[in-house]
Image (cartoon, helix red, strand yellow):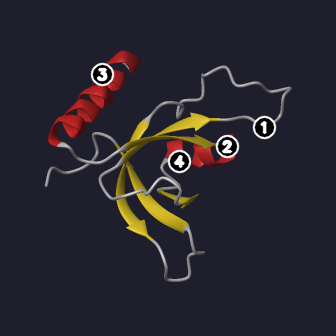
Amino acid sequence: MKNKEQNKELCYLDKLKNRGVGKHHDIKILPDFADAVYKGEKTFEVRENDRGYQKGDTVSFLVEYTNPCTRFDGTHPLHGKTYKITYVLSGWGIKNGYVVFGIKPVGDEVEE
């Protein structure tokens, strides 16, 4: 099942590349936030906009543990999952240089 999901994500990324749509970003995330994203409770990210995030870009999460005693072994279910950026908000009370963007798992979006 996991290989089928990974293939679906790779095919989606290939489609985006061929259409010239969006960039892909690999971004680090702490385990507590990763749990909430994986469960669907957290459908947004607050990030420094050092990458020029745009609607239509994709992100994959790299779960990072800060405690050296609990080294990450790559088994967190969110690790490597691909999400599409559905909305980007800057200004409007957001600190200068930062954005809030909405995310949706790849495969859940409706074709436009």
- Is 59 rendered above or below residue 75? below
**Disc 4 versus disc 2: nearer the observer:** 2
Q: Earlier in the sequence, mark 2 or mark 1?
A: 2
Lateral position of residue 7 relative to residue 35, left or right: left
* Callout 4 crowding tier (Cα within 10 Å): few <14, some 14–19, many ≥20: many
Q: Earlier in the sequence, mark 4 or mark 2?
A: 2
Alpha-carbon distance for marks 2 and 1?
8 Å
Q: In the figure, 67 relative to 87: above or below?
A: above
Q: Where's residue 100, x and y in %? A: 50, 65
Q: Which mark is residue 30?
A: 2
User: Which residue is located at x 49 percent, y 83 percent?
Assistant: 92
Along the polypeptide, which appears first: circle 3 or circle 1?
3
Secondary structure category for the residue under label 4: helix
Residue in the foreground of this view, choosing between 100 and 37? 100
Q: Residues within 10 Å of mark 2 (few under 14, many from 20)?
A: few
Q: Amino acid at mark 2?
A: Leu
Q: Which of the 4 image quarters holds residue 63?
A: top right
> How far, Cα to Cα, is label 3 from label 1?
30 Å
As drawn, 111 above or below 100: above
Q: Which residue in the rendered view is the most extreme toward the bottom?
A: 92
Rendered-image quadrant of the C terminus: bottom left
* Residue bearing mark 1: 66
Q: Secondary structure at mark 2?
A: loop
19 and 110: which one is in front? 19
* Secondary element at image label 1: loop
Q: Which residue is mark 3?
A: 7
Name the residue beneath numbered marker 4: 37
State the SS at label 3: helix
Kindly report which numbered mark, 3 or 4, lies closer to the viewer in this rendering. 3
**Residues under numbered marks 2 and 1 in contact, where contact means CB atoms less than 8 Å apart:** yes
